[in-house]
Image: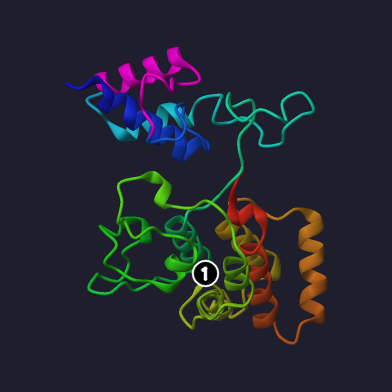
Amino acid sequence: NNGMFARSIVNRYMSYLMGRGLVDPVDDMRSTNPPTNPPLMDALAKHFAESGFNLKQLMRTIMTSRLYQLDSQPTATNASDRRFYAYYRVKRLSAEALLDAIDRAAGTQTKFRNLPLGTKAIELPDAEYPDFFLTVFAKPKRASVCECERSPDENLAQALHTLNGDILANKISDAKGRIATLLAFKSADGKPKPHEEIVRELYLAALCRPPSDAELAASQKFLEQAGSPKECYEDLLWALINSKQFLFVR
């Protein structure tokens, strides 16, 4: 019955999905810090309440809007905007989402203590599941109710971790992972999976898009220069995971 509940949830989900809430900082909901777009806040809060506080419906409404689908490339006239969503604000994947995305791309699963294999990082119920990767990428300890506990800033440790960290290297080279499975595949007549199909699957798994003709040509040249197909595809997946297209929501 508290009208601030719907407004607070709407603001948080706008912040999660758009990179900035209608009220910023996201926890600072007060009359002297009004939303940048009051009619939009009112409409979304009303819609959320009337849906029975359905979070999936709220996310669907935001993500199917023109606002969410704006280009992330600013123009000369709106580059200075930081308040009114003139363009989509590029933001890095959160620690949990990044680990899950890497597992999805590499075809692996992270085992969390006392939880069944297959549990995703975004499903962790609290902070009592220590994981080095999540710590490096700033998963908060939940010692505070303030959203500011999670830092969105990148740092050198994170860059080094994706560039040459053991966790990523082990996932890419996992004997039961995506690359090993693709290389072990044999068709009915005993032929291995073609190079183009392997590259296409790696691009779809990592970037959710097929490779361009130029990227396919470059991968073919790289295959010819690599010591082995396994080395070629592991390096390719490593490069895709370290790309901005993978690490950032654009």
Q: Is residue 43 magenta?
A: yes
Residue at the farthest top position? 39
> Residue at coordinates 56% horizontally, 24% vertically from top-left?
66
Q: Is residue 47 above or below residue 160?
A: above
Q: Secondary structure at mark 1?
A: helix
Residue 220 percent across, percent down from the top left: 79, 70
Whole-percent x, y for residue 208 in the image: 58, 51
Along the viewing direction, whichever of 95 and 155 lies nearer the viewer? 155
Nearer the observer, 63 or 176: 63
Q: Is 151 covered by the magenta stretch?
A: no
Residue at the far left: name it.
1
- Magenta region: which residues? 28-50
Q: Residue 87's image quarter?
A: top right
Q: Which residue type carries mark 1?
A: Ala
Q: Position of residue 190 (x, y in %)?
A: 58, 81
Colour scheme in use: rainbow
Q: Quadrant of the C terminus?
A: top right
